[in-house]
Image (cartoon, rainbow, N blue to C red):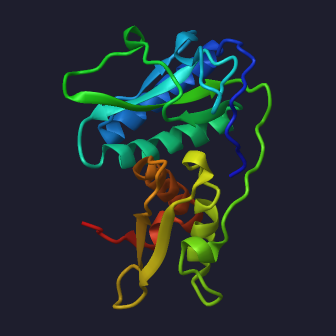
């Protein structure tokens, strides 16, 4: 995983091939998730007049992360949205998760009465490739140790590369069961944050952990 959040874009339009690929990806993701994700192109009003923090430049394309109101909507948004983000990177595009600093241009997308917009993902051709941010250690966010399974350590390393709001990394991942003849279980929990967005962050983190660890090597512990 080699991507960084990008806030400045060239303003150039997505190519027809890029739009088609993204719409196909989003259609497949909606079918798998039950979300109502939508691609908006050539629309710059959502990113005009930004506050000083998180200022964006040249954004004219974005993904609307929306779905039916539910207790797990935000976590699903993070999990499935990050899959789109990582796929976009392989297409040569740049992205950035956007929680608050945008305007809702309601005519650019459609919602049912029981649906809501959770956040947006800016997408396009970056003016830069972004930059790396400081990350916590594996020990700070997990119970990974020298004798932990290699797949678990790789999963934690991948989770530490996940984008989180304000780079807060407010999550905890623990290997909770490795015996009984069953798949090992892993617990993933969010930690309190004044900044919020930890449910979305947890979904993003779980997506990264699965890629690093390999979904075939473990099962998520039911946190209910």
Q: Nearer the viewer, residue 218 or 71?
A: 71
Residue 201 lies, in percent from the top left, at: 48, 51
Residue 211 lies, in percent from the top left, at: 55, 58
Residue 97 lies, in percent from the top left, at: 55, 36
Q: Nearer the viewer, residue 216 or 14?
A: 14
Report the residue at 42% width, 74% height from top: 186
The reply, left or right, for residue 197 in relation to residue 43 is: left
The reply, left or right, for residue 132 in relation to residue 136 is: right
Q: Is residue 21 above or below residue 170?
A: above
Q: Is residue 143 above or below residue 22?
A: below
Report the residue at 49% width, 63% height from top: 171
Q: Is residue 93 above or below residue 153?
A: above
Report the residue at 44% width, 63% height from top: 191
Report the residue at 79% width, 25% height from top: 127
The answer to whether residue 121 is visible is yes
Q: Is residue 7 above or below residue 108?
A: below
The reply, left or right, for residue 113 in relation to residue 101 is: left
The answer to whether residue 151 is visible is no
Q: Nearer the viewer, residue 47 or 143?
A: 47
Residue 223 lies, in percent from the top left, at: 30, 68
Q: Nearer the viewer, residue 141 or 162?
A: 141
């Amino acid at each position: 995983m080699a991507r960084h959040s990008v806030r400045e874009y060239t303003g150039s339009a997505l190519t027809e091939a890029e739009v088609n690929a993204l719409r196909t990806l989003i259609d497949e993701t909606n079918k798998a998730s039950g979300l109502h994700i939508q691609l908006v192109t050539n629309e710059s009003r959502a990113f005009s007049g930004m506050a000083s923090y998180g200022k964006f430049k040249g954004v004219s394309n974005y993904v609307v992360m929306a779905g039916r109101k539910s207790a797990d909507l935000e976590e699903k948004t993070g999990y499935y949205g990050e899959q789109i983000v990582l796929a976009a990177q392989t297409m040569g595009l740049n992205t950035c998760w956007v929680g608050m600093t945008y305007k809702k241009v309601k005519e650019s997308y459609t919602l049912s009465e029981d649906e809501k917009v959770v956040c947006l993902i800016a997408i396009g051709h970056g003016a830069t490739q972004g930059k790396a941010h400081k990350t916590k250690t594996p020990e700070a966010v997990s119970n990974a140790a020298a004798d932990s399974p290699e797949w678990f350590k790789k999963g934690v390393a991948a989770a530490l590369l996940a984008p989180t709001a304000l780079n807060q990394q407010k999550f905890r991942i623990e290997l909770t069961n490795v015996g009984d003849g069953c798949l090992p279980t892993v617990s993933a929990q969010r930690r309190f944050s004044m900044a919020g967005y930890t449910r979305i962050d947890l979904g993003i983190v779980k997506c990264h952990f699965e890629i690093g660890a390999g979904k075939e090597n473990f099962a998520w512990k039911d946190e209910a």
